[in-house]
Image (tube, grey):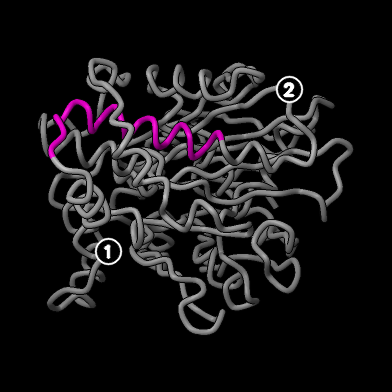
Amino acid sequence: MSDLYVGLMSGTSLDGVDGVLVDFSGMQPSAVTHASLPFPVDLKAEFLALNTAGNNELHRAALAGNALVRLYARVVNDLLLQSGRTSDQVAAIGAHGQTVRHRPTEFDGTGYTLQVNNPSLLAELCGIDVVADFRSRDVAAGGQGAPLVPPFHQSFFGGSGQVAAVLNIGGIANITHIQRPFAADGLRGYDCGPGNALMDAWCTQHTGAAFDDNGAWAAFGSINDALLASMLTEPFFALRPPKSTGRDLFNWSWLQHKLAECGPCLPVDVQATLTELTALGCARCLDACPEQPSQVLVCGGGALNGYLMQRLQVALPNYTVNSTALHGLPPLQVEATAFAWLARQAMVRKTASLESVTGARGARILGAIYPA
């Protein structure tokens, strides 16, 4: 079997598709090349709409899955062209799909998680085996189905011998506490709360921009202490891990409810307060580290938000906050590389989840395989 895998990720931020071609032949996974494509405006709007019940949503979800997979296939083609590889040299594609519902404890601990995808079409378009539906098996075993990336974080970033935390700030933020020495039953990882999702939504509504570039708009605002305090009363923040969340909770309606509670607030001040909410939600998770990490490694789109990184450092004065780029993997490539790793684990029949992370009844092999 080839050591080349493709990882594809389109996250809660809904900004587009990131893809990485990864070589697993060495001691450490190596990203050969990276490609990305933005979401068309109408597809992003459809995925946002599919987060809540609506008319004819099964049909609409199927069409959105087909449109997403055609973007996936274009990214895979770009990766092959950039690297000079052919489809028969790639063992498999790990394709996460687009999460539209995540309710793992909806029904007495046996809920569900739903990622819109069409892995059969992707295998047909690319001529490469596809691994998809990574979260459902963990949920079936009583787990949260999220976050899935901590075992990969440990594998890639845990070799330095230093105690570290990996903080992934996508639409939703999650954290991995890397242990030293590593013990599988000691690894911890869980969702922290909102990452970029609320900031992006507010920025789009009031400026027309898809996101607050480098946090420049938020930096002009002032944090509204009353609004921040109200948002931090959300019960999710007080839950003990394992825990996970998504747009099912932290969405536009949630934000509007909090704003109504606190009265008038300038739009730029709301943006500053949302940025602070993300920073504090992440910082509070560091308190649960069994060992205090020497450094916090940040990945995801949040790592490119300079103002957010400043607020994180202010909230974490005893830590060094850096991008994962300084440790061998650019922040926008980490999650896609993780799904290449998850695909490889499935293809070689190795477990990829941990009870200590998701709360499942035990480690499970994750993902369904769709042969080319």
Q: Residue at x 30, y 26 (%)?
A: 223
Q: Residue at x 45, y 47 (%)?
A: 193
Q: Is residue 251 left or right of residue 362?
A: left
Main secondary structure of the magenta stretch: helix
Image x and y of residue 328, in percent: 63, 22
- Give above or below for 318 relative to 170: above
Magenta residues (range): 264-283
- Give above or below for 117 relative to 197: below
Residue 278 belongs to magenta span: yes
Q: Nearer the viewer, residue 267 or 1?
A: 267
Q: Is residue 14 left or right of residue 209?
A: right
Label 2 sits on what residue type?
Ser
Q: Sequence order check: which comes first, mark 2 or mark 1?
A: 1
The residue beneath circle 2 is: 294
Image x and y of residue 84, in percent: 49, 30
Q: Which mark is residue 51?
A: 1
Label 1 crowd (10 A; few <14 / some 14-19 / many >=20): some
Label 1 sits on what residue type?
Asn
Q: Nearer the viewer, residue 134 or 188?
A: 188
Could you say whether the residue bearing mark 2 is in a helix, strand or loop?
Answer: loop
Image x and y of residue 312, in percent: 50, 24
Image x and y of residue 143, in percent: 62, 69
